[in-house]
Amino acid sequence: MIDKIVDPNWQLPPAFHFTQSNLQDFVDCERRFYLRHIAQQRWPSPLAEPQDEVERALSRGSRFHQLVERHQRGVEMDILRESIIDDAVIGDWLDRYEAALAELGPFEQRWVEASLSTRVANKPVLAKYDFIGRKENTLVGIDWKTGRLPDVQRLQERMQTVIYLLVLFREGARLAGQEIDNFALYYVSVNDGETRHFTVNAQDAHRLATQLQGVIEEVIHARDFPLTEDIWKCKYCLYRGLCERGTSPNLNDDDISPDDFWLDFGVTVDEIEF
């Protein structure tokens, strides 16, 4: 199985957009990128064990994001809380969400589940933000996380941070319909209330665009799509069984955070075969 042949005439699917998810796949393991986004291989391993707990955790995270979206679109929080009265965990997450939003705001304009795109290396790059808010001439992007946050250096290196900062800087003023002087990105963990904060200016944006262009050009010119040499990255990969790279991790392992694998890997409940 490990010697799955790579089609030398591979092409990106029609209307393909580069995103933080598929570019992170490529950075972590070129073979993962090929299997998922080019070959569209549908033979994933279990995400983790026990599978019913994984499904429950994924569903809870999805439910939280749905509630946040509805709140931002005008549904009263009391009404939303009535729908999760039997789930104290989500109730705690909503408490921390409200506290973080109050601390970062108030906002004169706001957008929820906002998609912005730009072009890098003449290819479309798409970013979808959980929330974007404007106060005066500052634009703030927020990404809600339900697991613990990685350290600042690791987050800074991730494609999500690179893309979200660059796209916000390039396209944020168009979204707001006015001049914007300051741009910020916040990761907020509703699990423990921690935040990570990044800003971007013109010099930063040039550096990020150069970095992103380099990765995109690597994708375009890739031919062999080798497996990663870092076996640890296979631990949370849905294709580890196909590549003969280990067994399912246990969800209850002390070193596991949900965001370590299913959010970084960009999967959703509907994409996982339980």
Image (tube, grey):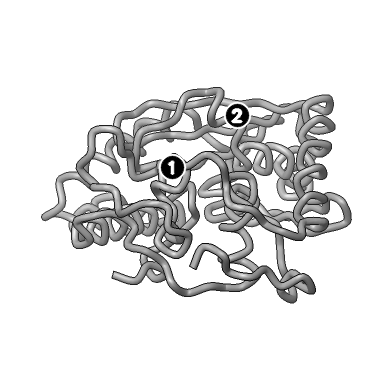
243, 236: nearer the viewer: 243
Secondary structure under badge 1?
strand
Residue marked by disc 2: 156
User: Position of 191 compared to 133: left or right?
Assistant: left
159, 81: nearer the viewer: 159
248, 166: nearer the viewer: 248
Q: List x then y, in percent, for residue 214.
A: 81, 42
Q: Where residue 144 is drawn, which disc sits there?
A: 1
Amino acid tagged 1? Trp
Q: Is residue 153 above or below residue 20?
A: above
Report, in whole angstroms, how far the alpha carbon at label 1 lies from the one at label 2.
16 Å
Q: Where residue 261 is drawn, which disc sits there?
A: none
Q: Answer whether labels 1 and 2 touch (C-beta < 8 Å).
A: no
Q: List x then y, in percent, for residue 87.
A: 15, 52
Q: Residue at x 22, y 58 (%)?
A: 56
User: Position of 262 compared to 182: left or right?
Assistant: left
Amino acid tagged 2? Gln
